[in-house]
Image (cartoon, rainbow, N blue to C red):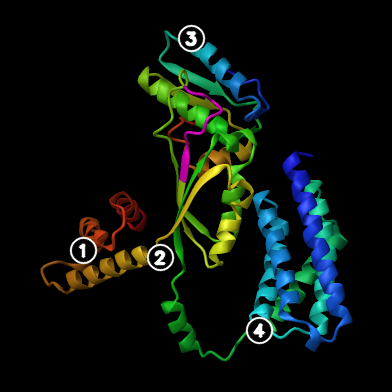
């Protein structure tokens, strides 16, 4: 077992211990006596577990913890009321998480009974999430809401340092984890600083990675994906939602305007990339670095 | 050149670089440089970085770089993830 994996197991034990202790305390109280700090403690532990498992690409642990974390998030935000059944369920979730982590670390698989139990817990968590989820919004309201909701978009730039390579951390696990909680696009490896092989210092870091990232999870969750390596990389996460929106809106407006012009048929205007770029250049008045605007133009087009 | 490494990672990177440099010396009169990945099962970012530096060298020397026999799924996935198949001359 690598040193990193040992640290991971130690941290998981700690988080699971916190959860167990909190849940036992909660089960000894009446529901009215359970305070928000106890719920927050559970949420933080589950959140840390999910983030750490993601760092190692343990997708089964991540997806399981994600559902449990969602329910805890709804409870802490008072969108779903805590019940004694829920506390009992979280005790089972805690036990199963231990089992799931052990099995995953040993690169083993759940047997049939364990898998049935796993799926059963997931459906019980989902029932709590589904049953209590607000359902009073009408269909038209829902559509309207969907149209108005913009998924936060980020530009993530990562430059691994020498220490990153030396610690044998896996950038692919981080990317994989980000892919679990959001959508990655335009992933690029920037190699302009790399010397030729006869001149390279092979353990140094010359590469940088950039991606466009859409994610509805809190910003802290995205940052947490890099917790393990934060001292070993240069990281820049910029929220580009507004810039993307403004370029999209301008592009849409331009489409509308051009469509209304009788001389120019719709099909021609929609497929023309040039006007979009022109408009996007104008958005440099948003005080964004011009290189970034260029990058955004590429992303949008 | 057939690579004799199961894993291309930071622990092997110096040997990997040296083997490539030796092979490049022997390859001087040719117009193509081929790396055979038949026995390689995994690759990390430091090795991808080294392959990109090899590509730069090959471009300077007007050598055509080709990576052949990439059987390991994880390697294929990583190269695809960063759109490197074309850049590194992966032969399917």
Residue found 65% across the figure and 36% down from its top: A168
Residue B77 or B10: which is nearer the viewer? B10
- The answer to which of marks 2 and 1 sits earlier in the sequence is 2
Say if residue B83 shows up in the picture. Answer: no
Q: Nearer the viewer, mark 3 or mark 2?
A: 2
| Residue that mark 2 sits on | A241
Q: Quadrant of residue B13?
A: top right
Mark 4 highlights which residue?
Answer: A78
Spot occupied by residue A28 in the image (x, y as percentages of width and height):
89, 80
The CA distance from mark 4 to mark 1 is 49 Å
Residue A240 seen in render: yes
Judging by the rendered image, the residue that carries numbered circle 3 is B25
Gap between marks 4 and 2 measured at Cα: 28 Å
Q: Nearer the viewer, mark 4 or mark 3?
A: 4
- Residue A203 sits inside the magenta stretch: yes
Chain for numbered disc 2: A
Report helix, strand or loop for mark 1.
Answer: helix
Residue tagged by mark 1?
A269
Q: Which residues are magenta?
A: A200-209
In what element is the residue under mark 2?
Answer: helix
Could you tell me which quadrant the C terminus of chain A lies in?
bottom left
Circle 2: is it few (<14), some (14-19), or many (20+) Cα within 10 Å?
A: some
């Amino acid at each position: 077992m690598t040193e990193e994996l040992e640290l991971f197991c130690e941290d998981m034990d700690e988080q699971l211990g916190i959860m167990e202790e909190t849940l036992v305390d909660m089960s000894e109280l009446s529901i009215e006596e359970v305070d928000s700090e106890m719920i927050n403690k559970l949420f933080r532990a589950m959140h840390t577990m999910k983030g750490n498992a993601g760092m190692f690409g343990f997708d089964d642990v991540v997806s399981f913890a994600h559902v449990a974390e969602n329910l805890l998030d709804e409870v802490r935000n008072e969108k779903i009321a805590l019940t004694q059944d829920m506390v009992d369920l979280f005790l089972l979730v805690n036990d199963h998480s231990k089992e799931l982590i052990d099995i995953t670390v040993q690169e083993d698989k759940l047997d049939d009974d364990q898998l049935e139990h796993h799926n059963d817990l997931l459906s019980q968590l989902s029932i709590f999430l589904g049953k209590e989820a607000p359902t009073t919004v009408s269909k038209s309201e829902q559509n309207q809401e969907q149209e108005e909701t913009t998924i936060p978009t980020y530009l993530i730039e990562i430059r691994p340092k020498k220490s990153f390579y030396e610690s044998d951390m896996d950038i692919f696990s981080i990317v994989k984890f980000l892919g679990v909680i959001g959508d990655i696009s335009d992933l690029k490896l920037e190699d302009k600083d790399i010397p030729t092989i006869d001149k390279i210092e092979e353990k140094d870091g010359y590469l940088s990675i950039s991606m466009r990232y859409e994610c509805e999870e809190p910003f802290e969750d995205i940052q947490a994906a890099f917790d393990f390596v934060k001292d070993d990389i240069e990281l820049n996460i910029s929220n580009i939602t507004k810039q993307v929106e403004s370029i999209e809106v301008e592009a849409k407006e331009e489409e509308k305007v051009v469509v209304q012009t009788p001389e120019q048929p719709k099909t021609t205007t929609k497929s023309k990339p040039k006007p979009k770029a022109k408009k996007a250049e104008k958005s440099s008045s948003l005080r964004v670095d011009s290189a970034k605007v260029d990058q955004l133009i590429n992303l949008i087009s | 050149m057939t690579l004799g490494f199961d894993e291309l990672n930071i622990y092997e990177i110096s040997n990997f670089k040296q083997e490539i440099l030796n092979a490049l010396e022997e390859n001087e009169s040719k117009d193509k440089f081929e790396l055979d990945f038949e026995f390689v099962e995994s690759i990390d970012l430091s090795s991808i970085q080294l392959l990109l530096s090899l590509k730069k060298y090959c471009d300077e020397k007007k050598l055509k770089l080709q990576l052949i026999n990439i059987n390991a799924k994880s390697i294929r996935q990583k190269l695809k993830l960063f759109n490197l198949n074309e850049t590194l001359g992966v032969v399917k």
